[in-house]
Image: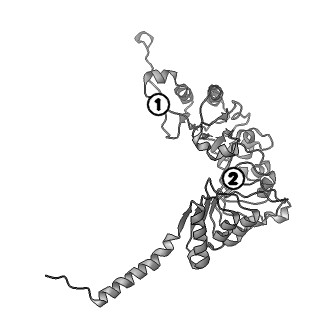
Amino acid sequence: MAARAPSRLAVLASISAFSLQKRLGTPHLYEHVLLKDVRRAKAFAAQLAKQPALGQHVRSLLLDHGGDTALFQKTIAHTPALVSLHGGADFQSITWKAFCDLSESAGASLRSCKGIRVSKPRGAVSPEVFAQFTKMEEFEWVSTTEFKTERKLTEATAFGGLVDLSVEGAFDDSFSEVLAHMELPALRTTAFSPTANGGAAFFKKHGDKLQEVTASEKQINDPEIALWLSCPSMTVIGVSFDQKVSNIFLHKFSACLPYDSTPVSASCLTTPDSHGKLEHIVFRAHGDYRLKQADQTQLGKLMAVLRSTMSFPALREIEHPLCTWPTKERETKSSPWVKWAESLLERDVHLFGPDRVHWRQRLKYVPKGKQ
């Protein structure tokens, strides 16, 4: 029996459904956008310029291409509802003017901004631009831009919803002063890079509200910052390792290279003051970092200090990215990690690696005559 041909009404219904699906589906295609090469980035910017209404649907942008500032400006000019903007490793620096353009086009909606490198302009610039980001919750500053530090130029209510602030690479200390002019009532977490130096004004103003801090060894030891006194509510401290990939070309591919690091000194986490809230210490080293003999010696001294110190009565966990547990008895006897872990367990402190697996105290054989 031959199949009946679809009625005209059924065909029209099918076409209408397809058209509706197309109209409903198009916005979702533009909601989360990843641009990994210049060609696609240019095509995307051209499409937004041709159909500005599509830009209303863009919520997140991940830019990982080598396009110039002009391409960035063309893109963000049509994304007024942007919520998340992240730059990848291949994303080029933008000008200060482009950063100001971003604040005007998406400042009212942007909640997360990370990896957007801003090239240093000539002379000091006004920090008034930060007041445009009214909903920002997560912000990473990647620039050595110098700011004018007159208090009247910084709105105290700027970044009012900021919870997480990170500073990547070197920064001008005027940025710290600008932050000190803000109230930042929601701030709880901050992170600085291994080479960070300075920031005393920021820590003195906002340290009392910080619960998680990642800082360089220089900052931890800086008497002007006085980290332990400035951050009385801190429960987690991350120690950033010093990066030694100085060649610009190699820096781009540093994730593929064996990684050298300045050993963290035994004095890094010592203080005559008592810090009653600190529970967790995290060593934040590069994924390919190698534990050389010098590092092992210094780390052993540091573990001994942390075992005996009375400065951190609430300390319960120490995390290191290279900490691994042996699976054979011969390896267990020679493992420095086992030695340090069992020593720390005597004061109820657990040592572990990225997998968060704790070492359990081994049972020790006691001869019958000595029981």
- Secondary element under disc 1, as helix, strand or loop, is loop
Dot 2 falls on a residue whose secondary structure is helix
- Residue pictured at 55% horizontal, 25% vertical: 336
Q: Nearer the viewer, mark 2 or mark 1?
A: 1
Amino acid beneath label 1? Arg
- The residue indicated by pointer 1 is 360
Q: Is residue 19 above or below residue 142?
A: below
Query: Where residue 311 sits: x, y (%)?
Result: 68, 34
Compared to residue 267, the image places residue 98 above or below, namely below
Q: Residue furthest front?
A: 39
Are there few (<14), some (14-19), or many (20+) residues within 10 Å of tag 1?
few
Give the image quarter of residue 220. Answer: top right
Indicate which disc, 2 or 1, sits on the residue closer to the N terminus.
2
**Percent of width and height locating residue 96:** 76, 63
Whether residue 30 appears in this view of the structure is yes
Residue at numbered disc 2:
209
